[in-house]
Amino acid sequence: MTQTLGDFPAEPKADPNLKAPTATRGRGPRQAVLFDIDGTLIVTDGAGARSWELAFADLWDVRADISRYSDTGMTDPEVGRRTFEAVMGRGPSPSEFARLLERRMHFLTMTVAESSGYHVLPGVEELLPRLVAQGYVLGLVTGNLEAAAHVKLARAGLNRYFSFGGYGSDSADRVEVTRTAMRRGSVVFGKPVPPERFLAVGDTPNDVEAAHAAGIECVAVASHKYNIEQLQRSGADWVVPDLREGLPPLAE
Ligand SMILES: [Mg+2]
């Protein structure tokens, strides 16, 4: 069963009642927006860290505080491996690593569901449907394992907006995760989509750096751990306090 993509519109089709996608810096219209998850779309308030803690306690009866061994922007497999090395004093065997990942996913479903501080960040629930209505295809770029990303988004019903993504299960390197998302975006569009047709949205200097290394401009959102000034210093192309105003390069 094949689909013809020959009649795919060259430009995103805009709802006449909404602002049209804008050409950016003379390089043609954007087609896809790549969103980071934690601190950009949602905050799980420690559900991720608690799931690792429960997994280590269940398997090896040890206390594992991942915040001591990992940084924001690190991918899940890297967090698991580093924490294992720190608390066990050696690297995990392949079977230990496999069991760790399974237990962690098992507990994540529970910790996300039970997190009292879980919330969707301001403006997200209005922005995502608006972008889709304007004709943008949305993707994810995240250090989360693919399944973990979807567990985190499911509680808020946000999975439906995202057609593709690059995940921490694709690479430990966020630049490569971003490139993976771009390749998958091209598959969704049925033809290669150049970097300038993408826009990235993230909340950390790490997100900005990875987007730029992959050739994509980046909107940084200061609604979580980094403030406007820090994000400006990181070289973000645009910095917004939160997503209530929308994305500057896609509005006029
Ligand atoms: Mg983030």
Image (cartoon, grey):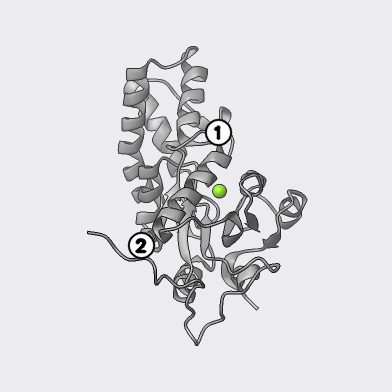
Q: Earlier in the sequence, mark 2 or mark 1?
A: 1
Q: Position of residue 183 (x, y in %)?
A: 47, 49
Q: Nearer the viewer, mark 2 or mark 1?
A: 2
Task: Specify the amino acid type for callout 2.
Answer: Arg
Residue, x 35% and y 55% (percent of image)? Answer: 154
Q: Quadrant of residue 55?
A: top left
The disc at residue 67 is 1
Cα–Cα gap, marks 2 and 1: 30 Å
Give the amino acid type for the residue marked by disc 1 in the picture.
Ser
> Quadrant where the C terminus lies?
bottom right
- In the image, residue 106 lies at what x, y percent? 30, 37
Residue that extends furthest to the front in the rendered view of this protein: 6
Q: Is residue 232 visible?
A: yes
Q: Secondary structure at mark 2?
A: helix
In the rendered image, residue 56, in percent from the top left (x then y), is placed at 39, 25
Which label number is shown at residue 160?
2
State the SS at label 1: helix
Q: Neighbour class for label 1 at 10 Å: few (<14), some, many (≥20)?
A: few
Dot label at residue 231: none
Residue plotted at (32% across, 44% down): 109
Outermost residue to the bottom = 17
83 or 64, which is in the foreground?
83
Q: Is residue 125 above or below residue 213?
A: below
How busy is the neighbourhood of tag 2: few (under 14 within 10 Å), some, or many (20 plus)? few
Tell me: residue 82, above or below residue 24.
Answer: above
The vertical placement of 64 against 91, above or below, is: below
Residue 226 as seen in the image, left or right of residue 14? right
Identify which residue, 204 or 173, lies in the foreground. Answer: 173
Residue 60 in view, yes or no: no
Name which residue lies at 58% across and 41% down.
175
Q: Position of residue 202 (x, y in %)?
A: 59, 53
